[in-house]
């Protein structure tokens, strides 16, 4: 058995390394973690061997040189989506041939509106295997032993099969994805919908969250279909399946950002839905895709439109059939 590598020591990345080290012991002997040496997350783990969510186990090893974690065959990446291209450019200078990468981020690049899978393919023209991880789950719940499900998708059936069998456990049940585009877009846009849910919480318009949950997958499915994915993927684990963790949980950064935004307060932490919202706006305008929820959110967050009247407009459109143009 060999170690698995993890690039990115945020709460999710560190948990995935902990999970692999503790729940996948039949397949994985330990985890090598890398992050920028000056990163607050790395410094905390280096100095205390713990973060607010977990303590590192004895078979987890910290590295401040990225080359040290590239010897392993399987590498999970969990960094901010807007920093991913720069990381890929750094990685492209190493021989990565034959290695398997699992991308554990949910978002779109703001400037290009591209998925993480597309970015890695562009920046690393080597013979590597790439998959994406999506679905519900919070570190705080997992650390209490609360089980959940996730989906792993790739354009290579063998890569999906390898990763699912490597990482499967009684804590996380992994499903085989069948829509690489849809699962990436669905996962990215559930963060955007989380912003909307948080704004409704901040306004104390709780009754509209049900309507948001009903309408958002239709909008997201329309977006997925435009890029030749299956619109019904919006109702799977990557999007609708992640709603409890994103639209309701006190642990959700995107929901909390929206709630504080509606109250005029600063969140002060990374909420991937914010830059992803800008990427969606770019695509929707360019391709003329009807995205009323996302358009209203953009007006509120980026153009400082009046929150109450703009959010009301999401649900106050022309009369039409409920499932018109769903697919």
Image (cartoon, grey):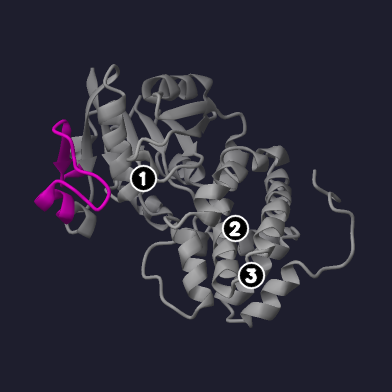
The boundaries of the magenta stretch are: 43-66
Residue 68: image quadrant is top left
Q: Which mark is drawn over residue 139?
A: 1
The reply to whether callout 1 and callout 3 are in contact (CB within 8 Å) is no
In-front residue for pair 262/326 = 262
Q: Secondary structure at mark 3?
A: loop
Gap between marks 2 and 1 measured at Cα: 20 Å
Which comes sooner in the sequence, label 2 or label 1?
1
Q: CA distance from mark 3 to mark 2?
A: 15 Å
Q: Secondary structure at mark 1?
A: helix
Q: Nearer the viewer, residue 321 or 170?
A: 170
Residue 100 in percent (x, y) is at 37, 28
Q: Residues within 10 Å of mark 1 (few under 14, many from 20)?
A: some
Image side of residue 230 versus residue 5, left or right: right
Residue 129 in percent (x, y) is at 42, 28
The image shows residue 183 at horizontal and vertical percentages of 58, 40
User: For mark 3, what is the residue?
Assistant: 205
């Amino acid at each position: 058995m060999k170690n698995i590598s993890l690039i990115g020591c945020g709460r999710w990345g560190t948990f995935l390394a902990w999970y692999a080290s503790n729940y996948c012991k039949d397949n994985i002997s330990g985890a090598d973690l890398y992050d920028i040496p000056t990163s607050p997350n790395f410094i905390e783990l280096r100095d205390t061997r713990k973060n607010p969510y977990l303590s590192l186990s004895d078979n987890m090893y910290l590295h401040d040189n990225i080359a040290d974690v590239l010897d392993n065959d399987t590498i999970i990446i969990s960094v901010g989506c807007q920093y991913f291209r720069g990381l890929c450019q750094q990685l492209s200078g190493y021989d990565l041939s034959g290695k398997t990468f699992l991308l554990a981020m949910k978002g779109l690049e703001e400037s290009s509106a591209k998925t993480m899978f597309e970015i890695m393919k562009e920046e690393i023209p080597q013979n590597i295997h790439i998959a994406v991880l999506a679905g519900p789950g919070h570190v705080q719940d997992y650390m209490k032993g609360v089980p959940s499900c996730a989906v792993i998708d790739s354009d290579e059936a063998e890569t999906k099969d390898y990763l699912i069998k490597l990482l499967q456990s009684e804590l996380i049940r992994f499903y085989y994805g069948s829509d690489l585009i849809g699962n990436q877009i669905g996962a990215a846009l559930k963060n955007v919908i989380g912003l909307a849910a948080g704004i409704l919480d901040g306004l104390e318009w709780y009754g509209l969250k049900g309507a948001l949950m009903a309408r958002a997958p239709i909008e997201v499915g329309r977006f997925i279909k435009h890029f030749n994915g299956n619109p019904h993927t919006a109702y799977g684990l990557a999007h609708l399946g992640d709603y409890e963790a994103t639209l309701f949980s006190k642990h959700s950064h995107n929901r909390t950002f929206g709630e504080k935004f509606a109250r005029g307060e600063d969140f002060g932490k990374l909420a991937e839905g914010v830059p992803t919202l800008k990427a969606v706006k770019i695509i929707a305008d360019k391709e003329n895709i009807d995205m009323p929820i996302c358009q209203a959110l953009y007006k509120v967050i980026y153009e400082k439109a009046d929150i109450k009247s703009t959010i009301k407009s999401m649900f106050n459109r022309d009369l039409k059939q409920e499932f018109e143009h769903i697919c």
